[in-house]
Amino acid sequence: MTLFGVPLILRSKRWLGVLAGALLLLLGTTAMAATVTASAAPSAPSGASREYVLSPDDVVHVAVFQNPDLTLDVVVDERGYIAYPLIGSVHVGGASVVDAERVIAKALHDGGFLVSPQVRVTLVQVKGSLVTVLGHVARPGRYSLDSADLRVSDMIALAGGINPDGADILVLTGNRNGKPMRREINVRSIGQADAVSENVLVQSGDLMFVDRAPMFFIYGEVQKPGAYRLENDMTVMQALATGGGLTPKGTQRGLTIHRKSPDGKIEIFQPKLDDIIRVNDVLQIQESLF
């Protein structure tokens, strides 16, 4: 059987081939469109970047979904403003990255430029943020935040670490959500599984202060008299060991502690070897009479 001089069965096979090719082309186009759409959709920045507070001289990348003409890098000026197309100057200084996204999106919407703008702000360079590290560290000073996810441990490392006479507790002060913040952080617990929250993120304007470690003093008939760091729950026996032990002339029976009472008076008493040493205690080891 023929149709227009061509066998019907052959023509049927040709039409099937044409239909199959068209179907494959349609599927490929749809998949490509889905890929392009997915790649163009805004991705969520890291949690640390989104909470970072913008400061003058910071550089940010602003992108508006499906509006390439509104995608550009901008610098936060000394007043905290950025210059942005259509909406002009926008104040983002002191705002977090996620808040800056909302501010720009609202300005685009309220200005009648876009119905439902999807704005993404990404940190490019952190230049305007400084954290001050003072006290008993190797290199006290002001340090620039070159990343949005720097933590207390990172700032300690930048400052060269805590000196041997530095305390285990540092004080972090600054502002969070427009309110003053003060927090005491146990440096020794940083990195432990049950104290990850101690290693907090730092922000521009933060001040870290490492005080001198609590001390005790020992003198008299000991091998190494002097001032020593007071460890937690340190006993009299441990204090004697820290001072190198007694000299051949020293005696435990001649051991006394000089301790300042809350009213400022000095108390002198003979302790037991398992008594706990307190801050600024002075241990005196007297010479044996025999």
Image (spheres, rainbow, N blue to C red):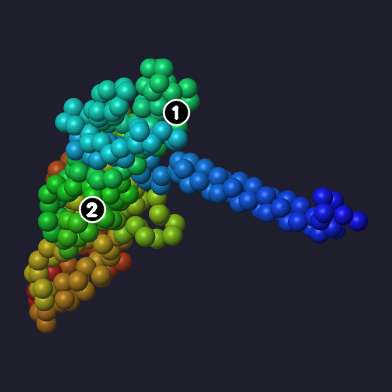
Q: Is residue 258 visible?
A: no
Q: Please determine whether, in this image, residue 76 is positioned above or below residue 36.
A: above
Residue 117 - label: 1
Earlier along the polypeptide chain: callout 2 or callout 1? 1
How many marks can you see? Answer: 2
For the point 40% across and 54% down, the residue is 196
Q: Which residue in the rendered view is the most extreme toward the bottom?
A: 248
Amino acid type of the residue that numbered disc 1 sits on in the rendered structure: Pro
**x and y percent of residue 99 in the render?**
37, 31
**x and y percent of residue 17 in the render?**
73, 56
Front residue of 191 and 210: 191
Q: Which residue in the rendered view is the most extreme toward the right?
A: 1
**x and y percent of residue 190 in the render?**
34, 57
| Secondary structure category for the residue under label 2 | helix
Quadrant of the image containing the C terminus: bottom left
**x and y percent of residue 129 in the render?**
21, 41
Q: Which residue in the rendered view is the most extreme toward the top?
A: 111
For the residues marked 2 and 1, what is the alpha-carbon distance in whole angstroms? 37 Å
For mark 2, what is the residue? 155
Quadrant of the image containing the N terminus: bottom right
| Secondary structure category for the residue under label 1 | loop
Front residue of 286 and 8: 8
Front residue of 141 and 236: 141
Residue 230 - label: none
Q: Is residue 11 left or right of residue 150?
A: right
